[in-house]
Image (cartoon, rainbow, N blue to C red):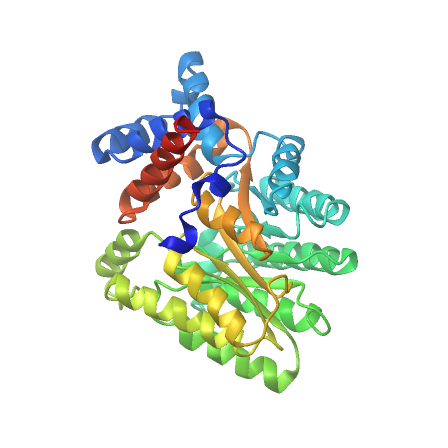
Amino acid sequence: MAYFDDTKTAFELKSNKDLKKAHFLFKLLGSPALTNFGTFFFKIPFATEIPFVKSAVRNTIYKQFVGGETTDDCLVVAKNLYKSGVSSIMDYSVEGQTTDEEFDHVKDEILKLIQISKQNPNEIPCVVFKPTGFGRIDIYEKVGHNMPMADHEKESWENIKKRYLEVCQNAFDNGVPIMADAEDSWMQDAADDLMDEMMQKFNKERCIVWSTLQMYRHDRLEYLKKIYEQAERENYLIGFKIVRGAYMEKERERAKEMGYKDPIQPNKQATDRDFNAAMEFMIERIGRISLFAGSHNEYSCELLTKLMEKNNIEKGDYRVWFGQLYGMSDNISFILGSKGYKVAKYLPYGPIKKVMPYLVRRAQENTSVAGQTGRELSLIQKEIKRRKQK
């Protein structure tokens, strides 16, 4: 689309060498066979301990999609991005925790990020966490479905609630917005209820606590409207990041295996319809709702700019954000940033070995989302050609 075709602006921070590396990487991601082999190989525990493999990962997919190993690494990247009007959201992308000690470590990391955001509010405007970073998925599932729980499981749930309360209270005290990601549908009800409780408690005057809706679920638009009506009655503010989601196969297979109703939209068109309808619903009620549109879809991003204009919302209004993943859709992020919109990159960080699950998902997502890799490649090729012709 013409709105996002300015490759000079899109890639102004990339050197010729960086562009060539990105071109090579997206070429690889465009091959399902290579991607499937790579994701299988990287799931082997020892894979990233092999020196040449670790080096190859660090200089290709890790560098493209990850901000660094530490918050200091990420802050350097974030400050560079902000020179072009693009903010960052540091995402501690370590997964697979199972113990209270590990969950408390994640909680402490989130508290550290709140302080970093407070000190760098333009570069790092908010903080994000994953619900399963604070507790086991089976505990969320049991609570959400009112299943019987042993005493130690009840204690685990109480610890999860304490972690939510501590980080949300800390975010409120420091004036830093905090956002919970959405995860698997079978654990989401309990996480949603907790986040709604936090919104009621902390969003009286400003939207500090935000939750996330995956619009590839057919019930999310209805849920958004229900929470809005509740917020109207009880007079608090709500904030939602909306995303499409990319793991339909996993959700469908589980629903089929366990014999419950498929939670996923019948097709991509239905997902697109509800995503855009959610944006319109929220923009028209901006007095009570804040919106973070997490999307690599150029039509939806342009539509949001038109909805803002139609509803007389300034480009730099803090209640409306655009968001893309670091390493993807730079044409959307940097063009919106150059025009004065609030836009942020999700900036993951963590040791290579521990962020491999995240990187595997990025590779799979680029392969599975129709047209994504091809669009990235065509834009990179266009910019390489433009620079040669200078």
Determine which quarter of the picture holds residue 56.
Answer: top left
Determine which quarter of the picture holds residue 243.
Answer: bottom left
Horizontal and vertical percent position of residue 73: 63, 30
Horizontal and vertical percent position of residue 387: 43, 29
Location of the C terminus by quadrant is: top left
Q: Nearer the viewer, residue 21 or 224?
A: 21
Location of the N terminus by quadrant is: bottom left
The residue shown at (54%, 28%) is 351
Is the residue 139 above or below the residue 47 in the image?
Answer: below
257 left or right of 150? Answer: left
The residue shown at (43%, 41%) is 7
Horizontal and vertical percent position of residue 300: 40, 62
197 left or right of 308? Answer: right
Q: Nearer the viewer, residue 230 or 29?
A: 29
The residue shown at (61%, 47%) is 85
Is the residue 63 above or below the residue 302 in the image?
Answer: above
Is the residue 350 above or below the residue 100 in the image?
Answer: above
Is the residue 16 above or below the residue 326 in the image?
Answer: above
Say whether residue 96 is visible. Answer: no
Q: Nearer the viewer, residue 8 or 74?
A: 8
Say whether residue 369 is visible. Answer: yes
> Which residue is most to the bottom?
233
> Which residue is most to the front?
390
Horizontal and vertical percent position of residue 377: 33, 37
Count how many numbered circles sit on residues in the image: 0
